[in-house]
């Protein structure tokens, strides 16, 4: 679909569906018509899926709009429940430059996609991260925690879509979604670990830019520390892992498994390796390096 050494953009789109296999398949198929789907995963407890697209800016643009359109057509947020916070059926659409693409090009891409979703799908669209406009809120957690009507959208109607909610779109640098499973369904313990991360990240360089929440996973009778590593080039994963294992021991629980969502740069593992961080389902196709050598 792409030529070797052609420009590459990544988009790890978060969709509020992790249970209905027909809808999940329809979303994957809709994107696959336009762009390479390099990874996707769905979680029933989160009731959320992440689909990762990789291709030229125009391919990723078409694929992202197709995902949004399918999500709006097939998912009703009024009937949705899940552990993970969400604002809409297609919740977050980020664009990250991977090869021979500038951040400015990704900003322009996010604006085109946001304008299309706002006008055609009638969803309020909030720009975030590098795409944010002067005087606007740029941080995703702040946008997500805002009250209805508190923030004026950048595109689309002023009020949420009746069944599809709102969507956040923007260009950003590399981000790694990483979940750590603990050995029992102790939500209080994972919330305490996540709180400790948030307290320490301003003074501890190994936790710089690490966002964390604690979640319950009833289906497997365990709990999870769910993280976004927003500065993966500055925070080696082995150091993060060591710190969180320490926090877990203080709560009398143990980390039993790592789960990475979407693509991961191998260089971010520092002195560690995937298996040393208990990434039991590691596969080469989840590394950025694999696709740089393939597309």
Image: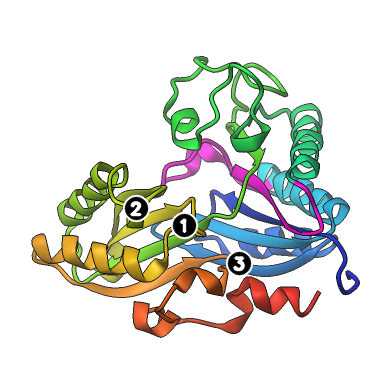
What residue is disc 2 on?
A: 205
Res. 248 visible in picture: yes
| Colouring mode (rainbow / by chain / secondary structure / one colour) | rainbow
The image shows residue 186 at horizontal and vertical percentages of 17, 59
Q: Answer whether residue 83 is magenta in the image.
A: yes
Question: How many residues crowd mark 1 within 10 Å: few (<14), some (14–19), many (20+)?
Answer: some
Residue at (39% x, 55% y) in the render: 227
In the rendered view, does 45 fall on the left or right side of 137? Answer: left
- Tell me the crowding category of disc 3: few under 14, some 14 to 19, or many 20 or more residues within 10 angstroms, Cα based: some
Q: CA distance from mark 3 to mark 2?
A: 31 Å
Q: Which residue is mark 3?
A: 40
Residue receiving disc 1: 234
Which quadrant holds residue 153? top right
Cα separation between marks 3 and 1: 26 Å
Q: Secondary structure at mark 3?
A: strand
Q: Are marks 1 and 2 in contact (CB under 8 Å)?
A: yes
Q: Secondary structure at mark 1?
A: loop
Q: Quadrant of the C terminus?
A: bottom right
């Amino acid at each position: 679909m792409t030529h070797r050494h052609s420009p590459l953009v990544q988009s790890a789109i978060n969709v509020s569906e992790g249970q209905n296999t027909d809808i999940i398949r329809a979303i994957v198929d809709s994107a696959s018509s336009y762009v390479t789907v390099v990874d996707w995963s769905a979680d029933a407890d989160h009731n959320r899926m992440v689909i990762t697209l990789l291709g030229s800016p125009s391919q990723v643009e078409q694929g992202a709009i197709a995902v949004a359109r399918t999500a709006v057509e097939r998912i009703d947020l009024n009937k949705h429940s899940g552990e993970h916070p969400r604002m809409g059926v297609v919740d977050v659409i980020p664009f990250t430059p991977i090869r021979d693409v500038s951040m400015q090009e990704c900003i322009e891409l996010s604006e085109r996609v946001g304008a299309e979703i706002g006008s055609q799908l009638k969803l309020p669209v909030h720009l975030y991260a590098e795409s944010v406009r002067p005087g606007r809120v740029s941080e995703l957690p702040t946008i997500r925690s805002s009250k209805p009507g508190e923030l004026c959208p950048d595109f689309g109607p002023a009020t949420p879509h009746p069944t599809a909610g709102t969507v956040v779109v923007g260009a950003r640098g590399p981000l790694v979604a990483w979940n750590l499973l603990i050995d029992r369904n102790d939500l209080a313990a994972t919330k305490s670990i996540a709180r400790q991360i948030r307290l320490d990240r301003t003074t501890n360089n190994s936790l710089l830019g690490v966002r964390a929440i604690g979640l319950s996973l009833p289906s497997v009778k365990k709990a999870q520390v769910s993280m976004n590593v927003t500065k993966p080039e500055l925070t080696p994963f082995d150091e993060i892992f060591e710190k969180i294992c320490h926090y877990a021991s203080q709560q009398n629980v143990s980390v039993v498994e790592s789960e990475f969502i979407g693509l991961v740069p191998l260089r971010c593992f520092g002195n560690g390796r995937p298996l040393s961080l208990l990434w039991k389902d590691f596969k080469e196709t989840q590394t950025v390096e694999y696709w740089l050598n393939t597309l």
